[in-house]
Image: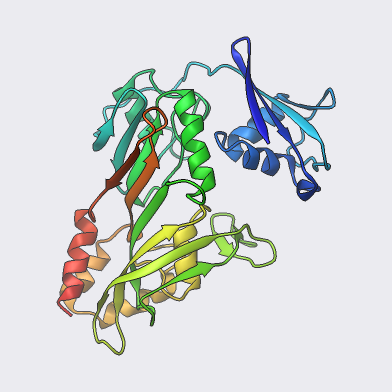
Amino acid sequence: MTTPSKARSSERLTAEAGAEHAGQRLDLFLSGCLPQLSRTRVQALIKEGHVASRGATIEDVKYRVKPDEHFTLTVPPAAETELGGEAIPLDVVYEDDALIVIDKPAGLVVHPGAGNPRGTLVNALIAHCGKSLSGIGGVARPGIVHRLDKNTSGLMVVAKTDQVHRALAAQFADHGRTGELERGYLALVWGAPPRPHGKIAAPIARHPSSRTKMAVLPNKGREAVTHWRVLERFGPKDAPVASLIECRLETGRTHQVRVHLAHFGHPLIGDPLYGRGFNSKLGKLPPVLQSKLAGLDRQALHAAHLAFVHPVSGTLREFNSPLPRDLAEIVYAFKEL
């Protein structure tokens, strides 16, 4: 349970641990209880001495939570961002005083980080929105409620006020279980499932030997559920070469669609992390299709559908984005098989 209250210009959040949280790492517990804050943001606040329990400050992100323990987390007022706005074109789908929905192109990093100090979506948003972005995400992530991988294209919603950020973050944390949030992806994959639709329920965690990858780990992973539906199969009916699949998320883990589809035996075409083992299929395709796929420099994944309740108006807003040109051309080429 969490309750917010204002303390001067800072924001104070509280969280109470139940018996089911006993032994959980503090950063995991707090980020789970406070969906408006990313785990990275929670870790930074802990290390900066903004978390207390029983009157004592806790600065260890690995601190183990005890049953019935109360925590107070003080979020300092948002600092003026040191990031500069950059004139990067934005495909704005919808915008008002509360939020903005954009269609992110593949190749655009969402926020600055190691190796990407500039040229990000955040830099573009600062140039477009000025100072009207929420500060909850921290200096490096103003307005960012959820993310897409650099090489995944599609719809994202960004908050302009802290109140809207908190409301949207709660919807994303709920994953549509009790509300109307929906996230849908179009995925172009190798092969085709034998059934028309189904569900992948497989826990996901950090890969045990590669820090850049995630993996299905039944005994260590966090719950992850992806619902899928085959939209179209390409190639011979008895042995499809590829297929276009729609995926709906019930959870939101890092690389979830990519990991689940690879685990399912149908990795994303062009995925450098989870689909390399299928590159040998290229040599068996017609030259035109080989050329198209060779020129694809990203995974064939597009966030095509986004629906949420507008935090201010209370109305359901739904947005759809068609396949971008690079993926649409590959689909067209596959249809010629």
Q: Is residue 239 left or right of residue 254?
A: left
Residue situated in front as seen by the camera: 169 or 221: 169
Residue placed furthest toward the top? 8
- The residue sitting at 14% across, 77% down in the picture is 336
Residue placed furthest toward the bottom? 238
- The residue sitting at 59% across, 55% down in the picture is 211
Q: Is residue 240 above or below residue 246?
A: below
Q: Quadrant of the N terminus?
A: top right
Residue 160: percent from left, percent from top: 40, 25
- The residue sitting at 78% across, 32% down in the picture is 70
Q: Is residue 283 above or below residue 39?
A: below
Q: Is residue 40 above or below residue 193?
A: above
Q: Is residue 112 left or right of residue 232?
A: right
Q: Is residue 37 left or right of residue 275?
A: right
Residue situated in front as seen by the camera: 126 or 5: 5
- The residue sitting at 49% across, 58% down in the picture is 256
Residue 82: percent from left, percent from top: 46, 20
Q: Is residue 275 left or right of residue 216?
A: left
Residue 122: percent from left, percent from top: 39, 31
